[in-house]
């Protein structure tokens, strides 16, 4: 029912994290598969537990293209009704898939999300409640909780489990960073969905994160502004289209 799409360059310092991500998937109680976009690296370096798992398929991108492009290329290999983006250094909570899939199947909405937790180096976690409140949201409503580009994004992109057709219609944005902001506001603008008041994803805090790099702040404000305007324009276009249907 679910495909988890992960982009990775199989960096040595992240292989252990990727193995932990896989372990969190093996603890899920619903059927899943994963498509791993290997961004310009040798797929033979995939950790052994993943290489031996028949639920995992790899897409070998022959040269480095960046996370946004690699993830979008991996969408070509998705064959399930639902998709969840994930990073190679994070992990899912044990009930992440069952809670959201059950909600999607019983309500018929297009997406279901949850809260996330920051996972610190000592193993402790800090809950992050996104600005969008729990409950059902109509198409486009989530974006309204992102008051300005400089504010916290309205929902966690990797907490979204969404219909595959919606993800293909609103994939990763063409950005070097902040591409997942576009994906989150895009999917939530296209269909109604539900935010559950429980953590479904753990975001690992470590020195190798892109957000910790010296160049991160150089483009962050521009990426946020682009994604914010994208969400506003898409919301307006969808609502305009509804009002002019014959």
Image (cartoon, helix red, strand yellow):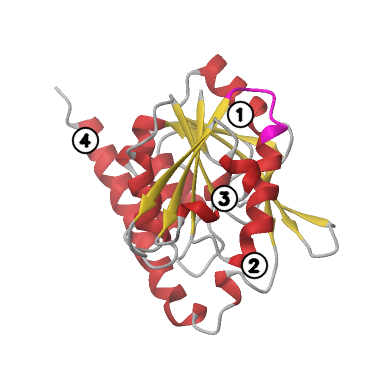
Reading the chain from its start, which is encountered first: label 3 or label 1?
1
Q: CA distance from mark 3 to mark 4?
A: 27 Å
Q: Which residue is mark 2?
A: 13
Residue under the image location 34 percent in, 53 percent down: 232
Q: Are marks 3 and 4 in contact (CB under 8 Å)?
A: no
Q: Is residue 178 above or below residue 221?
A: above
Q: CA distance from mark 3 to mark 2?
A: 25 Å
Is residue 5 or residue 132 the one in the foreground?
5
Q: CA distance from mark 2 to mark 1?
A: 31 Å
Magenta stretch, main secondary structure, is loop
Residue under the image location 46 percent in, 50 percent down: 144
Q: Are marks 2 and 4 in contact (CB under 8 Å)?
A: no
Q: What element does badge 3 sit on?
A: loop
Reading the chain from its start, which is encountered first: label 3 or label 2?
2
Q: Which residues are magenta?
A: 26-31
Q: State the image coordinates of residue 46 (x, y, percent, origin top left).
A: 55, 51
Q: Which residue is mark 4?
A: 241
Which residue is the extreme one toward the top? Answer: 106
Q: State the image coordinates of residue 237 (x, y, percent, origin top left).
A: 24, 44
Q: CA distance from mark 4 to mark 1?
A: 29 Å
Q: Which label sits on residue 100?
A: 1
Q: CA distance from mark 3 to mark 1?
A: 14 Å
Q: Quadrant of residue 104?
A: top right
Q: Which residue is mark 3?
A: 156
Q: Quadrant of residue 13?
A: bottom right
Reading the chain from its start, which is encountered first: label 2 or label 4?
2
Image side of residue 117 versus residue 70, left or right: right
Q: Residues within 10 Å of mark 2 (few under 14, many from 20)?
A: few
Image side of residue 127 versus residue 55, left or right: right
Which residue is the extreme one toward the front? Answer: 44
Is residue 146 or residue 88 the one in the foreground?
88
């Amino acid at each position: 029912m679910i495909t988890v799409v992960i982009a990775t360059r199989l960096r040595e310092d992240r292989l252990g994290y990727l193995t932990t991500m896989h372990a969190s998937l093996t603890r899920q109680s619903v059927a899943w598969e994963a498509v791993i976009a290997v961004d310009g690296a040798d797929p033979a370096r995939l950790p052994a537990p993943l290489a031996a798992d028949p639920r995992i398929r790899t897409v070998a991108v022959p040269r480095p293209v960046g996370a946004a492009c690699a993830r979008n290329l991996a969408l070509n290999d998705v064959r399930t009704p639902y998709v969840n983006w994930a990073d190679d250094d994070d992990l899912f909570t044990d009930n992440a898939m069952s809670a959201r899939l059950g909600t999607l199947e019983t309500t018929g909405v297009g997406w279901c999300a949850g809260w996330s937790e920051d996972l610190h180096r000592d193993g402790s976690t800090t809950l992050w409640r996104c600005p969008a409140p729990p409950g059902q949201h109509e198409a486009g409503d989530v974006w309204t909780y992102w008051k300005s580009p400089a504010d916290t994004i309205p929902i966690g992109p990797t907490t979204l489990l969404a219909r595959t057709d919606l993800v293909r219609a609103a994939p990763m944005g063409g950005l070097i960073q902040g591409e997942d902001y576009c994906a989150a506001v895009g999917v939530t603008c296209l269909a109604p969905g539900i935010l559950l008041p429980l953590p479904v994803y753990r975001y690992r805090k470590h020195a190798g994160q892109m957000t910790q790099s010296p160049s991160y702040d150089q483009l962050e404000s521009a990426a946020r502004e682009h994604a914010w305007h994208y969400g506003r324009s898409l919301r307006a276009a969808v609502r305009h289209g509804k009002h002019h249907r014959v």
